[in-house]
Image: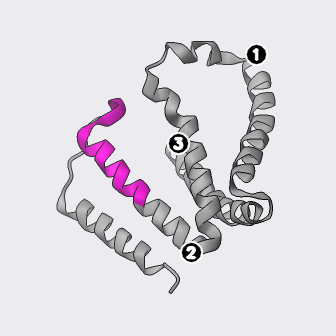
């Protein structure tokens, strides 16, 4: 499998796992509390990733260089926590399908702005009519998934 195929496969797997995460975190949040569920998720993530990092990098790898990076690169963890917190609360209220659909719609809108304006050092990507139509259709579709 070439690198594009691997990247595409990983993206699909992330999508599948993301939907499961919405459902699981919603139930855990209902049982133990939303903030507590987010903390459990953070701890479990650390317990899984730390040994992998230690084995793969034979130590802490590039973690020592973290504070030398631009401040905005350090927001990823906070943004991840906000995402997990949001899905933990939203899942039981509006359903897994609606959460995932709205999450994807929001991600697509933000990604389009990132591409269009070259934020965070990415190359600029033109915003053409097919892209705008695709975003509008996805946002409309996401809105249709809300429970009544």
Count residues near mark 1 (Cα–Cα under 10 Å), then give few for <14, some for 14-19, many for 20+.
Answer: few
Looking at the image, tell me whether mark 2 or mark 1 is earlier in sequence order: 1
Residue at the spot x=49%, y=45% of the render?
Answer: 4
The image quadrant of residue 89 is bottom right
Mark closer to the observer (3, 1)? 3
Q: Is residue 35 among what the camera can see?
A: yes
Q: Which residue is mark 3?
A: 79
Residue nearest the viewer, comparing 147 with 59: 147
Q: Is residue 106 left or right of residue 131?
A: right
Residue 70 placed where, x, y %? 43, 20
Residue nearest the viewer, comparing 124 with 144: 144
Q: Is residue 51 left or right of residue 20?
A: right
Q: Which mark is residue 87?
A: none
Residue 52 placed where, x, y %? 77, 31
Q: Which residues are magenta?
A: 106-122
Residue 91 placed where, x, y %? 62, 68
Q: Which mark is residue 94?
A: 2
Vertical comparison of 132 with 35: above or below = below
Q: Secondary structure at mark 2?
A: helix
Mark closer to the observer (2, 1)? 2
The image quadrant of residue 141 is bottom left
Residues marked 3 and 1 touching at CB (< 8 Å): no
The image quadrant of residue 115 is top left
Residue at the spot x=48%, y=79% of the render?
Answer: 145
Q: Is residue 98 left or right of residue 16?
A: left
Q: Which residue is mark 1?
A: 59
Looking at the image, tell me whether mark 3 or mark 1 is earlier in sequence order: 1
Residue nearest the viewer, comparing 78 with 120: 78
Q: Secondary structure at mark 1?
A: loop
Rounded to the nearest whole Å, what is the CA distance between mark 2 and mark 1? 43 Å
Rounded to the nearest whole Å, what is the CA distance between mark 2 and mark 3? 21 Å
């Amino acid at each position: 499998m070439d690198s594009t195929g691997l990247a595409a496969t990983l993206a699909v797997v992330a999508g599948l796992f993301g939907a499961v995460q919405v459902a699981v975190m919603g139930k855990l949040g209902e049982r133990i509390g939303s903030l507590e569920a987010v903390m459990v998720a953070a701890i479990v993530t650390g317990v899984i990733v730390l040994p992998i990092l230690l084995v793969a990098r034979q130590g802490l790898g590039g973690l020592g260089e973290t504070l030398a990076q631009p401040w905005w690169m350090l927001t990823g963890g906070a943004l991840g926590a906000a995402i997990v917190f949001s899905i933990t609360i939203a899942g039981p209220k509006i359903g897994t399908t609606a959460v995932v659909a709205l999450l994807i719609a929001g991600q697509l809108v933000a990604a389009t702005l990132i591409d269009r304006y070259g934020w965070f050092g990415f190359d600029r990507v033109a915003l053409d009519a097919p892209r705008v139509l695709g975003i509008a259709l996805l946002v409309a579709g996401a809105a249709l998934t809300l429970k009544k």
